[in-house]
Amino acid sequence: MAFFSGLYTRHFARTVPLALCWLLIVRASHILQSGIWPNPVGMIASDLAGALVLAVLLTITAGAFRVLLILLLGCAAFVAGMHLTVHGTLFQLSLIGKGVDPTFVTGSLLNRHSLLLPVYLVLAWTLHWLHRRLVNDPVVGRKGLAAFAALVIAVYSVSFQSLTTPTNNLVASFFSQIPGALTTPFAASVTEENEQAESPQEVRDDTNFFHQQMAAPDVDDQPNVLLIMIEGLSAGYFPSVSEYHDLDPSVELHSLEENLDRHGFRIYRNALSMERQTDRGTFSILCGEYPDFRRQSRKMVDVAEDRASADCMPARLQENGYTTAYWQAAPLDYMQKGDFMPRVGFKDVTGAEVFTAEGEEIEGWGPPDPEYFSNIAERLRDLDSTATPWMVTLLNVGTHHPFNTGDTDGENQEFDREDLEELARAEPQEARRKAMKTMEESLNRFLDDLGAGGILDDTMVILTSDESGGFIRQDPESVPLNSNVGVLAVRPPDGDSLDRYAPENQIVAQIDVPPTILDTTGLGKETGDMIGRSLLVRQKNAERDLLLADTYTGLKYFLRESGQLLSCSELMTNCSTWNFNPERLFGSLEEQTNVDPFLTFEERTALFNNAADMKPVENP
């Protein structure tokens, strides 16, 4: 035991409680900042593991390594607090590449919330200062201490299904993610994968994860189509849906729900968002395919860079005489949407650039929602005056962090002491709440304006979201699918009837949007290889299964519409089985203990590998 002699010294014995106290202070600051209370039992166990690792690091580092440790602690605590506030999870180390994108930096990092960075840096320096003054005993057994820390991290890694839920400890989670982040820091391109890939792997006949079903009705008068994607919106924010599932949302959009009802929308109560992040959700909504479930999302990029092809719904409409337009609020170069959208069938593609004067730089993510929806209403009036049918897709940005509402004292002004004091006084989630309320008012005016102008008369309108963000449950640890509570609301054109559409309690998903639009426009026979089930299908020919994931927690899901859910870790080695009422998915999940997974490890892996498959471009 001489190798581990450092564990029994007074130096280490004094450092552990100091590290634990510091981590609990950071934990408290994150709770105050985000409003999320983790599971207390898991939290204490996680913080104890983190304290042991941090104590080792404090013991064995000195000089430049100690400076690096303090900087790393301060920055990690800052990023963790922001990520918890915005996404409800700690950060995924493997996704750090997105954080250095210039558009992301100016849009989400350079705002008054960045004032908290020096606060966390000072807090980390205070830990260093206290350790130097309270613990003066000589250091022995550095190698044994390092080996002990590695052992703690290894045990920690296999003890948690997800390393980034709020229960996790900042330090232990960070170091536990390093091996995975180093082994696959970047996803291979489609070209590289197809050079080595075998044919799609076989799964059992009783699974139906790549289901397609269309009604394919004949349509005499093709309607216009307006597809509205609201950044981060969840149906859990609608009071009737949250009450139906017994959810506790951070935002309640009463007037938007009432206005949707007045305009003849049907809000689906069991709508699933396939994944997190805008590019993943947008790909499913437009192309009727599963999003990229890998750590690094490549599907949209591979299409944009002509390495892969996608047979998407806008192209089908354009080929059949529709004028297609994609008008978003954010810059088009982020996620390469400026290249992707024309390749999948959009003729008119605009982003934040049209909202700024020529030569001016775009501030933040783009225009706030009042400015955005007012501009879109004018463009739609001009477009509707033409003789050809049109399909327009929208994506706002005001409900994206840092939640710019367009106030004169907005996020892009100079930061000062008053900003920091206001942040300290602000209720957790208040910025999100204000942004959602601003969106609600803007979208209500937008729909009322379109209705008054007669534009809605011959237009099918679908309201959905690129992803579902926000906090739906008080205890985000206890139940899966916390970040997959999506939104889908449908308004058929005048002359059509909601009686033809699926009932409001049916399980629906983002991949159902393309087949529904094609069915409504009379192009239901032209879906090609798209998956999904049209909402016009009333007689289901089979119970389908769905693949889902949450890239921020690293969890992957296998859902059977008949009432079973398999929740698995990122590597799909650790799984739990849940049952639910198919008509009340989010409000009836119950874990089943001592039950074997209904898919083997090989089948689970094969399904997600098959979902990643894309057609390479011929002669690129």
Image (cartoon, rainbow, N blue to C red):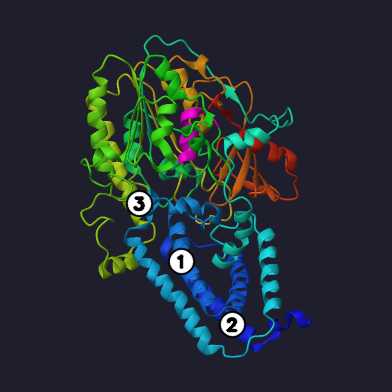
Look at the numbered discs 3 and 1 and tell me whether their residues touch, using CB distance below 8 Å. no
Q: Residues within 10 Å of mark 1 (few under 14, many from 20)?
A: some
Q: What kind of residue is marked 2?
A: Thr
What main secondary structure does the magenta stretch of the protein show? helix
Query: Circle 1 is placed at which residue position?
Result: 75
* Mark sitting earlier along the chain (3/1): 1
Of the two numbered discs 2 and 1 in the rendering, the one whose residue sits closer to the viewer: 1
* Mark sitting earlier along the chain (2/3): 2
Q: Residue furthest front?
A: 619
Verify whether residue 225 appears in magenta: no
Considering the numbered disc 3 on the image, is that residue within a helix, a strand or a loop? helix
Query: Circle 2 is placed at which residue position?
Result: 15
Q: Is residue 260 left or right of residue 100?
A: left
Residue 490 in percent (x, y) is at: 41, 28
Q: Is residue 600 left or right of residue 582?
A: right
Q: What kind of residue is marked 3?
A: Gly
Res 561 visible: no
Residue 548 in percent (x, y) is at: 58, 40
- The quarter of the image holding the N terminus is bottom right
Mark 2 vs mark 1, CA separation in Å: 21 Å
Residue 275 in percent (x, y) is at: 52, 42
Verify whether residue 283 appears in magenta: yes
Q: Residues within 10 Å of mark 3 (few under 14, many from 20)?
A: many
Q: Which mark is residue 296?
A: none
Considering the numbered disc 1 on the image, is that residue within a helix, a strand or a loop? helix
Q: Is residue 454 left or right of residue 166?
A: left
Query: Circle 3 is placed at which residue position?
Result: 107
Q: What kind of residue is marked 1?
A: Cys
Q: Residue furthest right?
A: 1
Res 108 visible: yes
Q: Residue at x 65, y 33 (%)?
A: 195
Name the residue nearer the viewer: 407 or 504: 407
